[in-house]
């Protein structure tokens, strides 16, 4: 083996190790460091009882004491993950919602059940917006499918154009973005119908999925235009972040992952907004936030896709030899 080939082999090995380090931090690291940290919950109880209960849980729970109606409204607004209602007698109810992230709901429900059992015995369980297993899985699954479907479409266009020896114009990339949005929305709708026929497929749900798919496709197409296949170094790992980070709630993530990954990952905006729409809560704050964020991503991606390149600007300008130059004769 020549020295140059040996050096290339060493570089390849180091590159593989670096990829493993990055993916370990982005995916398994986020899951391995999950721990409750002031998970927001609401309590509806008489003042003397509320003081005793809020001492339960240490730093794992963040209590908000409110009236029963106010506590349930906090749950509807997704400001808490569960509600504990304690009556003046030995009765307790833990209220959860299917429109809330299931990871946060599970932690809050377990903690509130333990607190109620210590005071009034096993509590009753009440679920607002009941959801099936498919309903809990569908929002994040749709977001991941939209991302990977758009990515596959963008890569296919890049490779097919390269093999044909042709340059991809803005029109072709725009058609690919819209085409991916339509077809991926149809694929997601088909999976929803297959997984759970009770999931709504109305204009709000399908429109939100279409917005997410076209936004992802536009951003990917823009990066592929700027960087070529090198954009995969960014776009590929982002897909792996989806289940590890976007499926969690910030109160369960290590502060570093919360600030560096969860705060901006596009999957959480599409997943949480779609979760509310699927459970019939179109006025939830995360629906509005998702529309604004995905709309901004779509606009930025389309600017990158449609902005005329250097060759296009040169073709639009008249050639110097074709210009008429007036020469005055004195």
Image: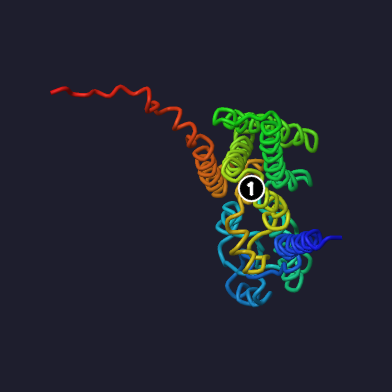
> Is 121 above or below relative to 77?
below
Residue 306 visible to an observer of this rendering = yes
* Display colour scheme: rainbow
Q: Nearer the viewer, residue 107 or 82?
A: 107
Asked which secondary structure carries label 1, the reply is helix
> Is 99 above or below relative to 63?
above
Q: Is 243 situated left or right of 273 in this image?
A: right
Residue occupying image coordinates x 75% and y 32%: 190
**Quarter containing the C terminus:** top left
The residue lying furthest to the left in this view is 330
> Is 80 above or below relative to 140?
below
Residue 231 horizontal/vertical position (percent):
64, 48
Residue count near mark 1 (Cα–Cα under 10 Å), binned few <14, some 14–19, many ≥20: some
Q: Is 107 situated left or right of 274 in this image?
A: right
Residue 24 horizontal/vertical position (percent):
75, 63
Q: Quadrant of residue 188?
A: top right
Residue occupying image coordinates x 48% and y 34%: 308
> Is 109 above or below relative to 228?
below
Residue occupying image coordinates x 59% and y 51%: 76
Q: Nearer the viewer, residue 167 or 213?
A: 167
Residue 281 horizontal/vertical position (percent):
60, 43
So how many labels did they put on this image?
A: 1
Residue 93 visible to an observer of this rendering = no
Residue occupying image coordinates x 54% and y 49%: 285
Q: Quadrant of residue 41?
A: bottom right
Residue 209 horizontal/vertical position (percent):
64, 37
**Quarter containing the N terminus:** bottom right
The residue lying furthest to the right in this view is 1
Mark 1 — residue? 231
Q: Is 255 situated left or right of 125 in this image?
A: left
Q: Nearer the viewer, residue 279 or 307?
A: 307
């Amino acid at each position: 083996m020549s020295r140059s080939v040996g050096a290339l082999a060493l570089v390849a090995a180091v590159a593989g190790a670096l990829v493993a380090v990055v993916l370990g931090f982005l995916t398994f690291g986020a899951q391995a460091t999950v721990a409750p940290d002031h998970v927001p919950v609401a309590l509806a109880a008489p003042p003397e009882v509320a003081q005793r209960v809020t001492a339960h849980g240490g730093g794992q729970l963040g209590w908000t004491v409110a009236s029963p109606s106010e506590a349930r409204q906090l749950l509807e607004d997704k400001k808490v993950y569960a509600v504990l209602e304690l009556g003046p007698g030995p009765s307790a109810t833990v209220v959860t919602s299917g429109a809330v992230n299931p990871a946060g709901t599970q932690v809050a429900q377990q903690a509130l059940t333990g607190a109620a059992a210590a005071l009034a015995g096993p509590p009753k369980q009440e679920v607002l917006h009941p959801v099936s297993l498919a309903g809990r899985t569908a929002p994040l699954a749709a977001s991941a499918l939209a991302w990977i479907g758009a990515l596959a479409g963008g890569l296919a266009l890049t490779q097919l154009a390269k093999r044909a020896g042709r340059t991809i114009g803005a029109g072709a990339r725009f058609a690919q973005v819209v085409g991916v949005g339509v077809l991926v929305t149809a694929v997601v709708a088909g999976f929803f119908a297959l997984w759970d026929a009770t999931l709504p497929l109305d204009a709000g749900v399908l429109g939100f999925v279409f917005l997410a798919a076209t936004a992802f496709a536009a951003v990917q197409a823009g990066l592929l235009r700027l960087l070529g296949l090198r954009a995969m170094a960014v776009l590929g790992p982002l897909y792996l972040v989806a289940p590890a980070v976007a499926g969690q709630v910030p109160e369960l993530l290590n502060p570093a992952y919360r600030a560096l990954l969860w705060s901006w990952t596009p999957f959480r905006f599409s997943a949480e907004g779609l979760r509310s729409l699927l459970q019939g809560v179109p006025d939830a704050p995360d629906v509005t936030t998702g529309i604004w964020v995905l709309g901004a991503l779509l606009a930025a991606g389309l600017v990158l896709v449609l902005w005329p390149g250097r060759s296009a600007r040169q073709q639009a300008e008249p050639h110097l030899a074709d210009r008429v130059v007036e020469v005055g004769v004195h």
